[in-house]
Amino acid sequence: MPDSLFYRGQGDNLRLWAVRRTGVSKLVSEGVFTTIIKMAIPMLAGTFAMNMYNLTNAWFVAKLGTEALAAISFTFPVVMLLMFVTRGLSGGALTLVAHAIGAKDRAKAATLTTHALILAALFGALVCGLGLVTVSPLFSRLGASGQVLEMTVRYMNLWYLGAAVMTLQIVAADIIISTGNTRAVSCLMVGSTLVNVFLDMGLIFGKFGMPNMGIAGAALATIISQLLALAAALYILASRMGLVDPSHLAPGALFSSWSRILAFGVPGALGMILTPISSAVITRLAAGYGNSAVAAMGVASRIEMFAFMIPMTVGMSLIPFVAQNFGAGRIDRIRTARHGTMTFAVLYGVFIGLVFILFAPAMAGLFSTEQAVVDVLCSYIYITCMGYGMLEVHRYAGFIVTGAHYPLQASLLNVIRVLVLLIPLSLAGSYLFQLRGIFFGRLATDMLAGMTGIWWSGRMLSRRRSA
């Protein structure tokens, strides 16, 4: 058991937990920024690996041609949709487990963890079944056709078969994060990415004695690497932390936990799925300007992940930090964290935006030799990058509001960004200024959404302080 967490004892066949020495989790006792930095730094390597995970898939698939790159780009909104729904559900489990730890209720934390994993497995099976039935008509409606559609279907048929692995792996990793042990999750992410890169080379191109599967090999590589990460995460939860307790599987207990998880997870999922839905709408708009535009925007979404890499590590720390401190009644620490992290997001966003402007042509050249793709990609970066900081502010606001037990309010923040701002502004931009207008719509959205997040999160925490 890591020293920074808590130890496990046994008695009457029940796992009993206690926080070491002080009886209080370090997330609610150490300095605010010291705690966040200690959680964020181990996640830096993991977040870098997660971004490489997406980029390597796109980079290797790009070697198969523009059609293959366009195909993988068409899958991105759907894959993100399903991952965001899963993360919405896992966010409910993360928040409730962290709240239980902050309130020193270790038995409840173990019960919630076990029930959340069962719920994730059932959801993954549902995704698999529905996905396999709808794969071809869905991507046809998104604008894929001919050889691009054929490649897209080949990739997603395999990806759907591994949906349960994906959902379980996400939920297990998020619960580990809820305990404050970000180092373990970072190691899982790095290891999974290394395995994925090796399998991509082998399964896409037929190297190392593996079959040459083309674009389908990228999907199989993802499934295998996630399966190994899942096995390691379950070992940590069950053997190292004792947070898997199969003794509470009565239907009444299961449904009680699921209702609590879904009370947080459904609003979170509904808010989060708006992002990939908007991505699908924008991909459909871009498809009207040709496969080069779709391929460029698919690559851009992956390159952007590097812009958010360092802020993302801070964001991953916010929900467990806020939830544990909310459980301990420390709203003052939450307000301090809000001010500091949002200030950091704005300053870092300006810095990374300038870096991206400087290196945009070089980054575009890594993924395509076609000038049309390079031109669109550079145009996208030049226009949108100055909104990166405010986009992170908006995300931080959602994390803070969720951790403070306002999941519906966090969902409404995403509704405002996507339905009120992003989709209308992108449609208007496309109508008035063609492809570049879509990019300007995204920039305006990020700036306005960030300002809304600052006001909204401050208002919600004022309510908690006066309650």
Image (spheres, rainbow, N blue to C red):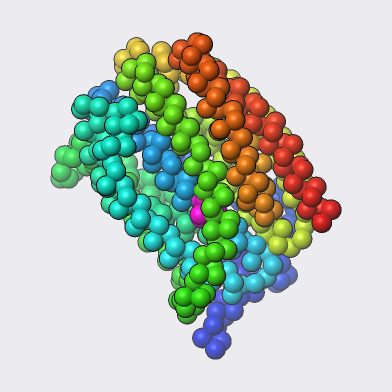
The quarter of the rendered structure image containing the N terminus is bottom right
Q: Position of residue 222 (x, y in %)?
A: 32, 46
* Segment tinted magenta in the rendering: 87-91
| Quadrant of the rendered image containing residue 8 | bottom right
Q: 134 left or right of 452?
A: left
Q: Position of residue 113 (x, y in %)?
A: 51, 66
On screen, 115 above or below 303? below
Q: Is residue 141 visible?
A: yes
> What's the magenta bit mostly, secondary-structure-wise?
helix
Q: Nearer the viewer, residue 455 or 142?
A: 142
Q: Position of residue 70 (x, y in %)?
A: 31, 27
Q: Position of residue 115 (x, y in %)?
A: 48, 68
On screen, 2 above or below 364? below
**Count of labels shown?**
0
Instruction: State the residue at coordinates (66%, 27%).
Output: 448
Instruction: State the residue at coordinates (84%, 53%).
Output: 466
On screen, 418 above or below 184? above
Q: Residue furthest right?
A: 466
On screen, 425 above or below 436? below
Q: Residue furthest bottom?
A: 12
Q: Nearer the viewer, residue 350 or 190?
A: 350
Q: 338 left or right of 67?
A: right
Instruction: State the residue at coordinates (71%, 71%).
Output: 23
Q: Is residue 180 visible?
A: no
The quarter of the rendered structure image containing the C terminus is bottom right
Instruction: State the residue at coordinates (52%, 43%).
Output: 272
Q: Nearer the viewer, residue 43 or 289?
A: 289
